[in-house]
Every structure is written in C-alpha cells, then in structure tokens.
Image (spheres, rainbow, N blue to C red):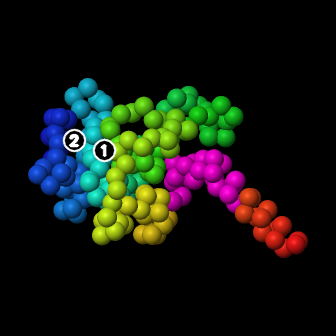
C-alpha cells in the first residue's frame, strides 16, 4: 500500500464526510488502514489521531468501524493509546515505579465529541460532564453506531480487544468511579428486603 508522505490529507473528508481511514475500512483494505495508523508526518509525529477523530453525524466513528470490521487494526490503535515510554529500558512491569499512560479518547463513551486535541491523556480524563456536541437522535438512527466501543467489542465478540490493558484499565476506572457504588447499593437494598 502506498501512503503519501503528505500528512495534511489524513484528516480530510470526501463529500460523504468520510476520511481516508474510513474509505480503507469500507474497501476492506487492511493494509491501507494499518499504513494510515502507522503513518508519521515529515517531523516524525504520528498522524493517526487525525484519522480517528472523524465522528459521523449518525454517531459512527472510525474506531467503531475498526472494531466491527478490522479488529486487528483496532488492536493496533489500542496499542498506540498505551504509552510505556517513560520507563527506563531495564525496568520491568513488576517494578513498583513502572508507569503506563492510557489515552481513553477513542474507546470512551464521549467519542462523538472528538475534536482532535490530545489533552485528555490522563487516567481520569473521561470528560463525563461535557454537554458539548450532544445530539437528539431519531429512533431510526439508533443503530449499532450509537453503541459505545466497549459494548461493540462485546457484541462482536472481540475478546482480544476486551482483554487489552487499555480496555481493562478503563473498565476498572468505571467500576471504581460508578459501578461498585450501584452494585453495593443494590446489594444492600436486596439484603434489607430479604431481612424484612
């Protein structure tokens, strides 16, 4: 596959609002999709974030398309969202000071609000409060496009993606922030119901 060294075209869209990555996915060109994800501009900076920030008006995103049709390329994206570069080469993952930085931008629930900025790389940056970009959708548009990426992984049985450290870390964060409170609250109500 030939990918131009011009990085300016990675984020451009056609008349159907589809970028180069989405066209490669639609044409079932895994080699081109991988080349786009691995592409760097003339200064060595990765250009793949530009290709993943094109949310369609129906809620579909390039990452969701990758999960549905090219899980191997989706795993490549998950790997790029997991940064372990701050660790010295002699440090092992068992070390207490081992550091991993996750970027949840492309698998979080707010993926339709993408702007292309790289400022949400911390572990607590899921942007749950923002109402920017919220859309009211008609029932006929409520398709699998509106399922969040984690649920798409479950629906399409993408076990390799579900077991990726980025995904398990996000699930753990959601469990810690919300899930356990609801679970233990419901368990307490159930126990009270059983006692009385």
Residue 195: x and y in percent read 88, 71
Between residue 156 and residue 125, name the one nearer to us: 125
| Residue named by callout 1 | 53
* Nearer-N-terminus badge (2/1): 2
Whether residue 190 is visible:
yes
Q: Is residue 182 left or right of residue 14?
A: right
Q: What is the quadrant of residue 9 in the picture?
A: top left
Q: Is residue 145 left or right of residue 31?
A: right
> In the image, is residue 158 part of the stretch drawn in magenta?
no
Residue shown at the point (59%, 34%) measured from the top left: 99
Residue 107: x and y in percent read 44, 51
Secondary structure at badge 2 equals loop
**What range of the chain is rendered magenta?**
162-183
Q: What is the quadrant of residue 64 in the picture?
A: bottom left
Give the dominant element type of the magenta stretch: helix, strand or loop.
helix
Between residue 191 and residue 177, name the one nearer to us: 191
Residue 13: x and y in percent read 16, 46
Q: Crowding near pointer 2: few (<14 within 10 Å), some, many (20+)?
A: some
Q: Does the residue at mark 2 contact the one at mark 1 (Cβ under 8 Å)?
A: yes
Between residue 155 and residue 81, name the one nearer to us: 155
Residue 124: x and y in percent read 56, 38
Q: Is residue 179 left or right of residue 112?
A: right
| Residue named by callout 2 | 11
Q: Crowding near pointer 1: few (<14 within 10 Å), some, many (20+)?
A: many
Identify whether 7 is placed above or below 192. above
Q: Is residue 14 left or right of residue 70?
A: left
> In the image, is residue 179 part of the stretch drawn in magenta?
yes
Residue shown at the point (31%, 46%) measured from the top left: 52
Residue shown at the point (32%, 38%) measured from the top left: 115
Give the CA distance from mark 2 to mark 1.
Answer: 8 Å
Split into 4 quadrants, where in the image is the C terminus?
Answer: bottom right
């Amino acid at each position: 596959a030939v990918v131009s060294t011009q990085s300016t075209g990675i984020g451009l869209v056609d008349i159907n609002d589809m970028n180069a990555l989405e066209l490669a996915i639609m044409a079932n060109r895994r080699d081109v999709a991988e080349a786009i994800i691995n592409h760097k501009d003339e200064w060595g900076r990765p250009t793949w974030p530009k290709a993943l920030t094109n949310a369609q008006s129906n809620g579909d995103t390039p990452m969701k398309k990758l999960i549905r049709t090219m899980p191997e390329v989706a795993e490549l994206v998950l790997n790029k969202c997991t940064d372990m570069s701050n660790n010295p080469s002699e440090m092992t993952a068992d070390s207490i000071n081992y550091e991993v930085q996750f970027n949840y931008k492309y698998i979080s629930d707010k993926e339709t609000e993408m702007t292309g900025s790289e400022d949400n790389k911390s572990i607590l940056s899921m942007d749950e409060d923002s109402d920017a970009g919220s859309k009211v959708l008609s029932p006929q548009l409520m398709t699998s496009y509106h399922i969040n990426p984690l649920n798409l992984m479950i629906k399409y049985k993408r076990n390799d993606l579900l077991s990726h450290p980025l995904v398990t870390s996000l699930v753990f964060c959601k469990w810690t922030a919300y899930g356990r409170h609801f679970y233990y609250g419901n368990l307490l109500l159930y126990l009270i119901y059983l006692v009385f």
